[in-house]
Image (tube, grey):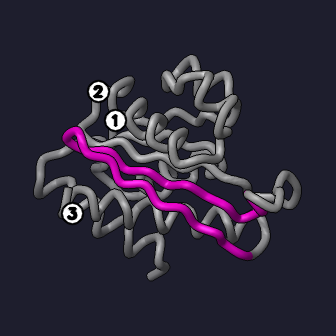
């Protein structure tokens, strides 16, 4: 069993036992978090959907990330990730919202935000938890590590608030 499959099974068990629904806002992962979840039969019981918000326009218009957040701190930031997670929960009428935004490379990095910089945020019952990661590897490896951490953080916010 892969790490992703393990995390998916744990999250599905938590969502079922707590009778919660979940939605995602995915940027750098481009739908990989959602795809990992829908591999499980019966997931429609608690999975509401996802917004793949690769562009800033979608982050602003669909997830309601304030444009001044993107212009001041960027789309790859703690603040943007938090708004994305809250937006996913609100816009998809879900109990839990999880987001991932970052730089998967091979281009696009800077000294302040090198390739592999990822922010993942989880929102549930008015509480948010956001973490910053600096993953290494190629584009796919960075995206896969982001999926694992997003699933982990979703489980943590459900268990611990």
Q: Which residue is mark 3?
A: 13
**Discs 3, 2 touching: Cβ within 8 Å:** no
Q: Which residue is mark 1?
A: 48
Specify the farthest residue to the right.
Answer: 107
Which-is-in-front pick, marks 3 and 2?
Answer: 2
Tell me how many marks there are: 3
**Discs 2, 1 touching: Cβ within 8 Å:** yes
Q: Quadrant of residue 161?
A: bottom left
The alpha-carbon separation of the residues under discs 2 and 1 comes to 8 Å
Residue occupying the point 41% across, 47% down: 98
Q: Is residue 46 visible?
A: no
Q: In this orientation, which residue lies closer to the viewer: 108 or 35?
A: 108
Q: In this orientation, which residue lies closer to the viewer: 122 or 68?
A: 68
Dot 2, how many residues are within 10 Å of its Cα: few (below 14), some (14-19), or many (20+)?
A: some
Question: Which stretch appears magenta?
Answer: 113-136
Residue occupying the point 28% across, 34% down: 94
- In which quadrant of the rendered image does the N terminus lie? bottom left
Indicate the secondary structure of the residue bearing disc 1.
strand
N-term mark: 2 or 1: 1
Q: What percent of the width, then of the height, locates residue 101?
A: 60, 48
Specify the farthest residue to the top.
Answer: 61
**Residue 51 belongs to the span the image colors magenta:** no
């Amino acid at each position: 069993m892969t790490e992703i499959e393990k995390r998916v099974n744990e999250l599905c068990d938590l969502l079922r036992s707590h009778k919660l629904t979940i939605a995602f806002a995915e940027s750098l992962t481009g739908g990989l978090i959602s795809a990992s979840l829908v591999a499980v039969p019966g997931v429609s019981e608690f999975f509401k959907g996802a917004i793949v918000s690769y562009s800033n326009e979608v982050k602003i218009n669909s997830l309601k990330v304030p444009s001044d957040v993107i212009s001041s701190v960027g789309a790859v930031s703690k603040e943007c990730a938090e708004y994305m997670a809250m937006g996913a929960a609100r816009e998809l009428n879900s109990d839990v919202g999880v987001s991932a935004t970052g730089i998967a490379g091979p281009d696009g990095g800077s000294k302040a935000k090198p390739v592999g910089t990822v922010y993942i945020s989880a929102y549930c019952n008015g509480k948010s938890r956001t973490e910053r990661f600096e993953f290494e590897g190629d584009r796919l490896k960075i995206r896969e590590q982001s999926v694992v951490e997003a699933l982990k953080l979703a489980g943590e916010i459900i268990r611990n608030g």
